[in-house]
Amino acid sequence: MESSIASQFNEGVKMLFSSMAFIYVFLPLTCLFYFLAKNSAKNYILLAASLIFYGWGEPSYLAIMLCTIIINYCAAMLVDKHRKIAFYAVLFAVIANLSILGYFKYFNFFVENINLLTGGKIDFIKVVMPIGISFYTFQALSYVIDVYRKEVPCQYNFYDVALYITLFPQLVAGPIVKYHDVAEQITRRECSLDLVSKGIERFIIGLGKKVLIANNLGIVADKTFALPAEQVDTLTSWIGALAYSLQLFFDFAGYSDMAIGLGLIFGFKFLENFNYPYIASSITDFWRRWHISLFSWLKLYLYIPLGGNRVSKGRNCFNLLAVFFVTGFWHGASWTFILWGMWHGVLIVAEKLTGWHKQSNRIVLRVTKHAVTLFFVLIGWVMFRAATITYCFDYLKNMFGFIDHSRSNIVYGPAYYFDNLQILAFFVGLICSTPVFKIVIERYYDNVAFRICYRVALLALLIISTMYLAANTYNPFIYFRF
């Protein structure tokens, strides 16, 4: 056990929530110092813990984050003190933040595409992207913009601004916390045993989603997408796409659950980031349920400033496409992400023009719309997962039977992709992607016997997840790459 903990600390910046090091060393020590400290010192304890969490193994990333903090702290003060130049201060903050993000996240992409288009051979040193930069950049921007809009007062305490941007529960993979949602909590928040209890429960649920469902389905998806499309039979290609869809959801939703749970432990109440997106009845409804914090950020700080839906129909369609272009490009410097974003943008526009997204009371139509939505979402996840545009189209052709397998060499049978544990994870994932368990828990939670059984089940879930972590090395977080 000790060697396992030590090895995971040596992974550097990848101090995962779902790691022995975090669960049994970092988090208990942080809680110990936090709850023993006076109220006036609690923010400093959290700030120190957040900097250690982020900089572990790669302290140079802290310098980039410090630049972001200083830029936005100074810009907000200029906005507050000098309203005549407030617009230019915000503009400077936007350009500075996006320039830092653009350099570290997109420099390689642009140079490689320039070389490809021009046939040139521009030599360059590949830039390594700091973990979580997409998330904390958007959070930092929301602070300056909220001050500019007079939605919140300017925070003159540098350490409180630093805490908002670096707060470790949601630092590296969200949810994206807008400043106006937590401004009061930064300076004054409730800490209670009830919140700690709820936070621990939420953290364990997220850990189970990540470790037991996402990790197992990730093995299936990785095996499927690692092979050339012609070496995977059509049925398996569909199963692989579905496995990845569930892996991605439980990976990211599990992380969000853990982040929200950790926030509760320290008195922060973060907004929900997922609301059962796979029960959506339209793509519009899907985006009200999927990665809620990103979509609400883009709505507030991009879609509405562009005019939102208060413009002509044509301009509104452009605004929607612009938002989804940014959504795709935000996820990564790759044409496949842009394709995925535009796929959803076109579908949203089509729903807007046809009224397909409107609710219906007819059961047959609702079921049909749900099935159609899942079909389009699944196709989109193939785009999201594929390493290249070419492979994406090859995989999609295979899914629809346009690859002749009679001439190919399919050497792996179903046993190569699944074992019994992964099959179980598959079916549990299908059930847990619906609100069945949530409805049961909410209905019977007031019953003392049920509540005792529920907490015993959570303890068992923690033990099983810990055993799984100790016995396995496959434990990536997909959204760390964004």
Image (tube, grey):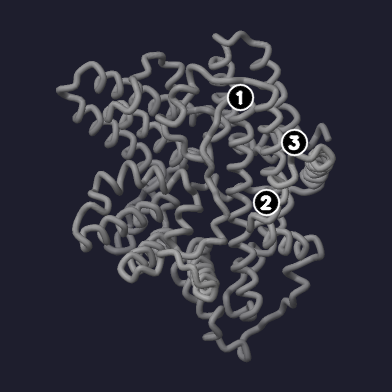
Which quadrant holds residue 152? Answer: top left
The single residue placed furthest to the left in the displayed view is 84
The span from disc 3 to disc 2 (Cα, nearest Å) is 31 Å
Q: Is residue 209 left or right of residue 288?
A: right
Q: Between 109 and 461, which is closer to the camera in this rendering? A: 461
- Dot 2 lies on which element? helix
What residue is shown at x 28% (from left), y 46% (from top)? 304
Q: Quadrant of residue 16?
A: top right
Of mark 3 and mark 2, the one earlier in the sequence is: 3
User: What residue is shown with label 3?
Assistant: 20
Quadrant for residue 452, please give it.
Answer: top right
* Residue visible at 39% across and 42% down in the picture: 297
Identity of the residue furthest to the bottom in this view? 406
Report if residue 391 is visible in the image. no
Is 132 rendered above or below residue 226?
above
Q: Which mark is drawn over residue 389?
A: none
First in sequence: mark 1 or mark 2? 1
Query: Foreground: 197 or 81?
Result: 197
Label 1 amino acid? Phe
Dot 1 alpha-carbon crowd within 10 angstroms: few under 14, some 14 to 19, many 20 or more:
many
Picture layout, residue 214 above or below residue 55: below
Amino acid type, residue under disc 2 in the picture: Ile
Q: Amino acid at mark 3?
A: Met
Horizontal placement of 238 versus 180: left or right?
right
Instruction: State the residue position of label 1.
Output: 266
Residue labelled with disc 2: 439
Q: Pointer 1 and pointer 2: residues touching (CB < 8 Å)?
A: no
Nearer to us: label 1 or label 2: 2
The percent coordinates of residue 29 (x first, y second) are 70, 21
